[in-house]
């Protein structure tokens, strides 16, 4: 390193003292501080923050700049910048990469500043290494410290014709300090967003199975329009000829309710591996949720739908409910029935009462409509939607199939709400198919 080109403090391997230098920089430093406050905190996106950092570095203090960020989750180093600030690449952990990380002190609270020549030699990306080696100046290293750790580094190169002054070194240090906090905040935000997406994906309503014997349709509208999850849940699982159809409603709404509905849904799936009878499944669910010591409860309608081998196009439904309204049966002729079946809430108390089952047949053109209380309790300018209106809407669609019934009911409820807020709205409709896998309709 040519010490004549650098401030004496830098030649001794130490960056210039922050406070003393920055205070004495006058209006230029004040303008730079304001620019940092505006530019670096304007986004919680790591890529955008990195691009703003590179732009500030190249326009204020350097001819060449690279941002190195550690990504522990994927065991990679992320490198951005160089001659083209839009250039970005990730390098996976390996011997050379780990040596470069140790040289920069990444993952350590503090580390001695590395020798610039070593940084250039060990840069784990050929393009950037070649650019740095060709620079007519040394590469200076400014560690990025955040929350007690070194999360990366800002590498700066400046032409020998324009050597950095002590004031510019102080500005570069200030830039690195502010950038470290901004980048760390952006990475934390992106990590939390990633976790949220994964959890939401696990709690979203499942994809409906394709069955040659059963036609299934569903509609779900969460109370919180910006979320795809809520307190209602439904599930359809099993094997051909023997399906379980479940619709439930957790006390409350939003993320907290969605977590419990995911637990309830998984509990039913697990219990169904040992006993597929709806009454037994609800009894098991009640025990599981009660033992969780939660103050929330769940209402559930659980149906086991089985095909008749001797009567193609016919199915039998074993039905049990836990505090949930019984489904409606829409017959092919347009008549609408509601089975007489009741059962205690699940998770509210431990009890010995059995969840009683009823069995009902579905013939060609019939359909079973499961729904949450958000449907009949939907409140618009004319009051509650109500069960009577639900029957009136469904009756003309007897024999029309699962999708038509589901769409008609959802559309009418939304029109009734007319923009008013609502609880979670969920509808699931099942209808038999003929032996060839076609929907049996009477329209």
Image (cartoon, grey):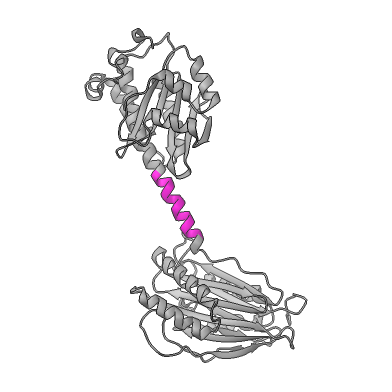
Rendered location of residue 382, percent (x, y): 46, 77
Image quarter hosting the C terminus: bottom right
Helix, strand or loop for the magenta stretch, by majority:
helix
Identity of the residue drawn at 48% across and 33% down: 95
**18 or 148, which is in the foreground?**
148
Rendered location of residue 422, percent (x, y): 45, 70
In the depicted structure, whether residue 104 falls above or below residue 338: above
- The mark tally for this picture is 0
Identity of the residue drawn at 51% across and 59% down: 201
**7 or 383, which is in the foreground?**
7
**387 or 325, which is in the foreground?**
325
224 part of magenta stretch: no
**27 or 77, which is in the foreground?**
77
Residue 199 seen in render:
yes
In the depicted structure, whether residue 265 falls above or below residue 56: below
Q: Quadrant of residue 305?
A: bottom right
Q: Give the range drawn in magenta.
A: 188-201
Which residue extends farthest right? 436
Rendered location of residue 267, percent (x, y): 47, 73
Image quarter hosting the N terminus: top left
In the depicted structure, whether residue 362 falls above or below residue 195: below
Residue 79 seen in render:
no
Rendered location of residue 46, percent (x, y): 44, 39
Q: In this view, does 109 lie to the left or right of 389?
A: left
193 part of magenta stretch: yes
Identity of the residue drawn at 41% across and 42% down: 187
């Amino acid at each position: 390193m040519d010490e004549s080109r650098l401030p004496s403090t830098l030649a001794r391997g130490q960056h210039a003292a922050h406070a003393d230098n920055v205070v004495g920089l006058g209006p230029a430093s004040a303008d730079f501080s304001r620019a940092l406050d505006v530019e670096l905190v304007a986004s919680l996106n790591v890529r955008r923050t990195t691009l703003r950092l590179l732009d500030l570095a190249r326009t204020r203090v350097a001819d060449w700049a690279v941002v190195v960020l550690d990504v522990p989750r994927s065991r990679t180093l992320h490198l951005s910048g160089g001659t083209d600030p839009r250039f970005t690449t990730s390098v996976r952990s390996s011997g050379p990469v780990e040596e470069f990380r140790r040289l920069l002190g990444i993952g350590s609270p503090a580390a001695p500043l590395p020798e610039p020549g070593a940084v250039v030699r060990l840069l784990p990306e050929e393009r950037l290494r070649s650019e740095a080696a060709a620079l007519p100046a040394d590469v200076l290293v400014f560690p990025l410290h955040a929350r007690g750790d070194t999360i990366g580094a800002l590498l700066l190169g400046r032409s020998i014709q324009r050597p950095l002054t002590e004031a510019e070194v102080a500005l570069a240090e200030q830039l690195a300090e502010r950038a470290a906090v901004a980048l760390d905040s952006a990475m934390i935000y992106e990590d939390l967003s990633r976790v949220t997406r994964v959890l939401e994906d696990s709690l979203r309503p499942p994809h409906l199975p394709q069955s040659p014997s059963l036609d299934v349709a569903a509609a779900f509208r969460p109370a919180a329009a910006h979320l795809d999850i809520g307190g209602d849940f439904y599930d359809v699982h099993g094997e051909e000829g023997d399906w379980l159809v479940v619709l439930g409603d957790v006390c409350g709404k939003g993320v907290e309710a969605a977590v419990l509905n995911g637990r309830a849904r998984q509990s039913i799936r697990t219990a169904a591996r040992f006993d597929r009878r709806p009454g037994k499944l609800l009894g098991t669910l009640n025990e599981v949720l009660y033992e969780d010591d939660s103050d929330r409860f769940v209402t559930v309608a659980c149906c086991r739908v089985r095909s008749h081998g001797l009567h193609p196009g016919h199915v039998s439904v074993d039905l049990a409910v836990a505090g949930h309204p019984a489904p409606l049966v829409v017959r092919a002729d347009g008549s609408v029935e509601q089975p007489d079946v009741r059962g205690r809430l699940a998770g509210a108390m431990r009890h010995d009462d059995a969840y009683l089952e009823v069995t009902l047949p579905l013939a060609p053109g019939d359909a079973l409509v499961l729904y949450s209380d958000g449907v009949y309790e939907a409140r618009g300018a004319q009051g509650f939607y109500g069960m009577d209106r639900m029957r009136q809407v469904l009756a003309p669609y007897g024999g029309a199939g699962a999708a038509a019934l589901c769409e008609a009911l959802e559309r009418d409820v939304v029109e009734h709400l007319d923009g008013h807020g609502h609880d979670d709205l969920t509808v699931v409709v099942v209808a038999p198919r003929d032996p060839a896998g076609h929907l049996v309709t009477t329209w």
